[in-house]
Image (cartoon, helix red, strand yellow):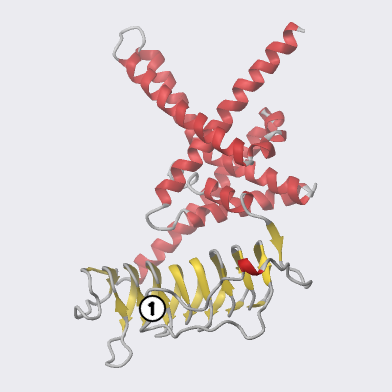
Amino acid sequence: MLKNKTKIMVLLLAFLLMFSTFCFATEGEPTPTSEETNTITSTAPGDNARVEEGTEPEPTPEIYSGDLYVFDNNIEMDQLVDGNVFLFGDHINVTGKVNGSLYACGNNVTFAKDSYVVQSIYVMANTVTLNGNANDLYAFARKVDMSYDSFMIRDLKVFADTFNFNGGVGRDAFVEANNFNFSNSTDKSAIVYGNLTYSASKELSLSNELVQGEVHYQKALDSKESVTEVILEKVISACNAILYTLVVFLLCLWLAPKFLNNTSSTITVSNIFRSFGIGLLTILLASMVSIGLLFTFIGIPLGFAIAALLVLLLSISGAISSICITYKLKEKFAYSKKYLTYLTLIGVVVAIWALSLIPYVGWVISFVVKMFGLGTIIYYLLTNKKSNNIAEKE
């Protein structure tokens, strides 16, 4: 169904793109900051036995201030970045340090031993090689190699065909891999300080020294057809999200062009919270009123009508949020070509759809996105009606 697969991911990207500075990588000099911001270290706290003590770079490098976006075939991310990093390319090599989260999408992605990400790593690639450190890891790849030098301070979540694990995890590890290889060599064994939940083709024999918490195992699907079906389902889901949003966008162009012209103004800090609050209030009031009317004989048809209208608005709320972000990007980068608008909209939908696949937070993203989109619709309807009434009086 389109209902839950089209509308989950928008507001998180809105926070990501609108609350941060848009700084695309260029060949110019990075923007330096004060010495107080130069506090990115090369070691991860909490595991001194596994991570070598870092030293300050001999010549103190300048810090890139702001979010860094890089699109290239071969990417060498060797900077100190005081913000988030977004990398899109074929071969990606990360040797720098990031005072935020790192998002990478490519064919081969490698994190060097001295690399460090203060927050989380989100990576989607064919092969991923991890030698550095971060707070959390979210990886979706065909093959993931995590060396002994790599340590995740908090949680690790890996979805892969093959996962060679020789690193460390400070809290819990969640793994879905057909081939899960847990290193247990005497001198350099992998370790999980919390719980391990994994799905693999065979169950592993792990001692309490390797996994200090609980171990939960589930047998992975053996048939290749099942894996193919899962991939096909994801592709169809993404295509459905794109198609559904495009249909809503075309309807808005036809029925509410004035609404589209005002959508970019909704992506500000105050307006985002306002729309979220209106959406939350709307769903609470509409639910209470419709349920109350169902207990009265006369109000039953009206109660069903309100419930149906609420479901309709919620079904398009995610698409409306994607359109708002698209028009904000269109305004920010000042392009007027129609095909660029459609490409931006598709990119926003796909990016948000991908973010919804993050375990345990997808439902939160879905809720926030729906409330923002619903609030945007209700606010426009109320203000547009008020302006029309004023015009009629004049």
Q: Above or below — where is 385 with respect to 160?
A: above
Residue 24 visible to the viewer: yes
Q: Above or below — where is 355 with respect to 304?
A: below
Q: Residue at x 37, y 54 (%)?
A: 360
Residue 19: image location, x then y, percent: 61, 50
Q: Is residue 149 left or right of residue 269?
A: left
Which quadrant of the structure image shows residue 98? bottom right
Residue 316 visible to the viewer: no
Which quadrant of the structure image shows residue 3? top left
Q: Is residue 136 left or right of residue 56?
A: left
Q: Residue at x 55, y 78 (%)?
A: 108
Question: For the residue labelled by badge 1, is the local secondary structure a helix, a strand or a loop?
Answer: strand
Find disc 1 in the rendering and name its residue: 162
Amino acid found under the numbered disc labelled 1: Thr
Q: Is residue 207 left or right of residue 143?
A: left
**How many neighbours does mark 1 have within 10 angstroms: few (below 14), some (14-19), or many (20 or more)?**
many
Q: Residue at x 53, y 78 (%)?
A: 115
Q: Residue at x 29, y 13 (%)?
A: 295
Which quarter of the rendering shows the N terminus?
Answer: top left
Which quadrant of the structure image shows residue 292? top left
Residue 45: image location, x then y, percent: 42, 74
Q: Compare residues 285 and 4 and report the one nearer the observer.
A: 285
Which quarter of the rendering shows the C terminus?
Answer: top right
Q: Compare residues 130 and 133 and report the one nearer the observer.
A: 133
Residue 212: image location, x then y, percent: 23, 74
Residue 215: image location, x then y, percent: 22, 70
Return the residue found at the far front. Answer: 36
Return the residue found at the far bottom. Answer: 187
Q: Compare residues 191 and 289 and report the one nearer the observer.
A: 191
